[in-house]
Each structure stands twice: as C-alpha cells, then as structure tokens.
Amino acid sequence: MKIQTKVCKEKILDSMEILLYDTKVLITRRTTMAFESLSEKLQNVFKNLRGKGRLTEADVKAALKEVKMALLEADVSFKVVRQFINSVTERAVGQDVLESLTPGQMVIKIVNEEMVKLMGSETTELKLLPGNEITIIMMAGLQGAGKTTATAKIAGKLKQKGRKPLLVACDIYRPAAIEQLQINGERQGVPVFSMGDKNKPVNIAKAAIEHAGKNGMNVVILDTAGRLHIDEDMMAELQEIKDSVPVSQTLLVVDAMTGQDAVNVATMFQEKIGIDGVVLTKMDSDTRGGAALSIKAVTDKPILYIGTGEKLSDLEQFYPDRMASRILGMGDVLTLIEKAEQALDIDKAQEMEKKLKKAQFGFDDYLESMNQMKKMGGFKDLLGMIPGVGNQLKDVDIDEKQMARVEAIILSMTPEERSNPDVLSPSRKKRIANGAGVDIAEVNRLVKQFEQSRKMMKQMSGMMGGKGKHGRFKLPF
C-alpha cells in the first residue's frame, strides 16, 4: 500500500521533526554532501536579494555576477555558465520583475526555472521494451567510476518494478570484476551470467541474450570493461557489441567527483559510440556538482540516475526540478515522501502515531523510529530535503555511527526497562552500560534525552492531526 501524498505529506514532515529532536544525540561530527558549497553560496546571494525591498538593474546584475562565480567554482562549464547567466539576466531585468512587490523572490524563481531547464526540464525514464521482449542495456564508463556497482543498482530498481533482469559479466580484464558483479547480483536477488575471462565480450553478450530468452528474462544488462582512460581498443570493443547485438540503451556511468572531466568523458563517449543517458555516481561525496549542471547542456543526453551512497539501494532517479530545489535550499519534499513510501511499514506507522498521540511509547518504539530513518538514508541528506531545515543544518554535524551505540544501549535493557524507562535505577544503568560496552554517562545521556522527548510528545499530542503550537522545523538544540 502506498502512502497518499496529499494526506500524509504533513504527517511525514511532522514525523521528521520528531525524529530530528529524537536524534540530536547523534550530532557530533562533520559530513559532506553534493553541492554543499554551491548551495551555500547561492543561498547567501538570494538572502541579500530578499533583504532589499526594491531592486535595481545594478542589484540584479551584481547578484548574478556572484551566481556566475559560484557556478564556475563548482566546475560548471564556462560556456554553460555564460549561457545560463545570459538567460537569467534577460528575464530578471525586465520591468515585471523590478517593479514586483517581491522582486527578490521573482529573481530566485527565474534562477530556479533556468536551472531546471539547464539540467533537462523533464525527467527521463529508462526506455524498456514491452512485455517479454528483451531490453538490452549496455553499461559503459571509465574504470573507477562505479560502473559495476551502478549496474547492480539499476538491476535492483528494475526488479522492484516487476522486471526480470539478468546481469552479464562482460568485463574480462579487471581483476575480480566478475566476482564483484556476482556478489552484488546475489545481494540484489538478480542472476548473473558469466563465461569467465577467456571469451570475447561480444560472444558473452550473445550467449547471455540467448540464455535470457530461454529463461523468461526480459532485461539484459551488460557490464562492460572500463579503462583508466579513453582508448581506441575500449571504444572498438563497445562498438563491436553494439554492432552484434540489438542494444536498446547505452548508459554511460561517470564519476561526479571528477567535475568537468566527467563532462569531457561524456562528450567523448557520445562522439565515439553514442550514448542514450548518463548515470552520475558519488553524488554523496564532497563534489562541486558541475557535472550534473553541465552534462545535459553539453551532450544533449539526459542524466537518468544519480548514485547517493555505497549501499545497493542508494540510487535515485534524476529529477531536474528536485535537484534545482535542493541546490537552491528549497528542500525536496517529493523525494522525501517517495523514500518514506519505500521504507515505512504502514501498520507500524499507524501504531506509532497512536502511541505518539497518547505519549505512550518506550525505548522499543524509539529504536524502531531510528531503524525507519536508517532505511530511508542518511540523516543529514534526508533532513536537508525538508524546506527550511537545510539552512539550519549548515553548521550541524551528524555522527551516524553513534546510532550503533544507541542501539547497543537499548538492546542491553530488559524488555521491562525498554517498555517502562521509569524503572531504570543507577544499578540497572551500570549493568546496561557494561552490556553495551559504553560509559555510564552515555546511558544517562540517552535516558535524559528520551525523557525530554516524551515530555515534548505530551506537549505535541495533537500534532499528528494538525499543526502544533510550536514553530515548524525549529531545531531544538
């Protein structure tokens, strides 16, 4: 059963605020995220614009000069930046904007719309043949871009949608490439076709397609070999595969951390063999983000997916409008809700809602809420999707490893202690600390925080049915 967006949007946001309060104990160290520097600089520019009641043409041009520098520092192509700034300027210095009651907001709206246009305007779906027809997807890319992992991630996505994918090990050169694909395929519950490293990749591809036809599989994903750099042998091998089997889609995997080099790689692959779309990996790293903002404009090929972590579930469909909102600090509620739809157990969520309303919850419920958050992804990334929270998290550091210690403390309690924390005496706390392998101060800190959370729940008992008296998304620390 899917959560209905209109009905549950407010509830999800409210629940995230509760979990934010619950997890303040985890905040201890710095984490990085894609576009962090760019987003911060752009938000500072827009903050200055909003602070002015009336804008002149000089104000707009000065602000856009700062935007230009921020984009260039993010490693966005110079030609793309120039075209982008020209488009924004042409619209932003018009009479309708400068004489508007909220000219700063109008400029931000224009920047957002032009940024969406820059990244592709519309979301592009992976094109799959209907029914039992076999869709053949060839994965390409340089070594180290995360191609094999991305291949398995896509197979997992397609399996969730009811497709029957087959992973094919065509990388016969890189040591352990076949084994890596087999391990990832097993974790995703997707079969892997391999003929070892003694056969030509084109022959492996042909045999895999025949195998898929005999076994009722309707998607074949070819994990081809990468190289440390683009060379003629690699391109010739990819072209031979395309000439020999009916490849439906050629997807290029590029590393977002390489910035403008990722755009250059995409351009070369497009010119040499032709590509249908791009998978951008390592978007959770401390990347400047230039690749995501440049690839579509330079190659005219869409970004289909972005890798947001090392887990096989960490792959998101690329939505230009949502990415623009994240970059500009506007949040990304739709992606947040989709993550909730995939991760939340509806029955448990309803049961938790009843307990929250009555403020009748114990450490087991506390642990369950943390597990739900873990399923949805990293805390900082998720909370950054909530409008207004991203800015407040700028200087907040979240240590997600602390979750393991919190879990150990709770699991060291007896069922009675977890359901009724009021029975926790000093001697019990000492026993729990020894069982969890932590200092008793950590146990006291967790218990104190839990008691504060319970008090907050009593004050917010009506929140799940509407808006509480508290200010939404004000951090409690």
Image (spheres, rainbow, N blue to C red):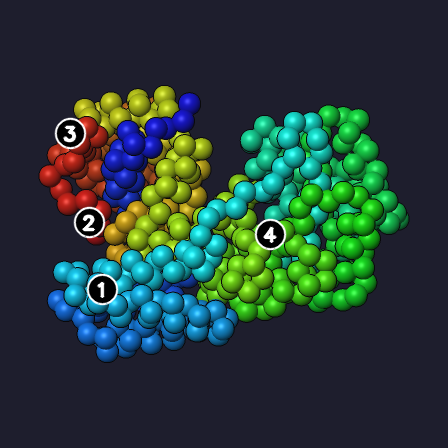
The location of residue 438, given as percent across then percent down, is 38, 45
The residue depicted at 38 percent of the width and 75 percent of the height is 69
Q: CA separation, marks 1 and 3? A: 42 Å
Of pointers 1 and 2, the one earlier in the residue sequence: 1
Badge 3 amino acid: Gly
Q: Nearer the viewer, residue 41 or 239?
A: 239
**Mark sitting earlier along the chain (4/3):** 4
What secondary structure is found at the residue carrying circle 4?
Answer: strand
Disc 1 target residue:
97
Does 464 sit above or below residue 144?
above
Q: What secondary structure is marked by label 3?
A: loop
Say if mark 1 contacts mark 3, CB within 8 Å: no
* Residue type at numbered disc 4: Gly
Q: Is 466 situated left or right of 39 in this image?
A: left
Which residue type carries mark 1? Val
* Residue 400, position as x, y percentages in the image: 40, 48
From the image, tell me which residue sits under label 2.
Answer: 474
Tag 2, which secondary structure?
loop
**Residue corresponding to mark 3:** 462
The answer to which image quadrant residue 218 occupies is top right
Contact flag, marks 4 and 3 (Cβ < 8 Å): no
- Label drawn at residue 277: 4
Residue visible at 83% across and 46% down in the picture: 244
Q: Earlier in the sequence, mark 1 or mark 4?
A: 1
Residues under numbered marks 4 and 2 in contact, where contact means CB atoms less than 8 Å apart: no
Q: Given contact means CB atoms under 8 Å apart, are the residues at marks 1 and 4 in contact?
A: no
Q: Residue at x 48, y 46 (%)?
A: 123
Q: CA distance from mark 4 to mark 2?
A: 40 Å
Label 4 to label 3: alpha-carbon separation: 47 Å
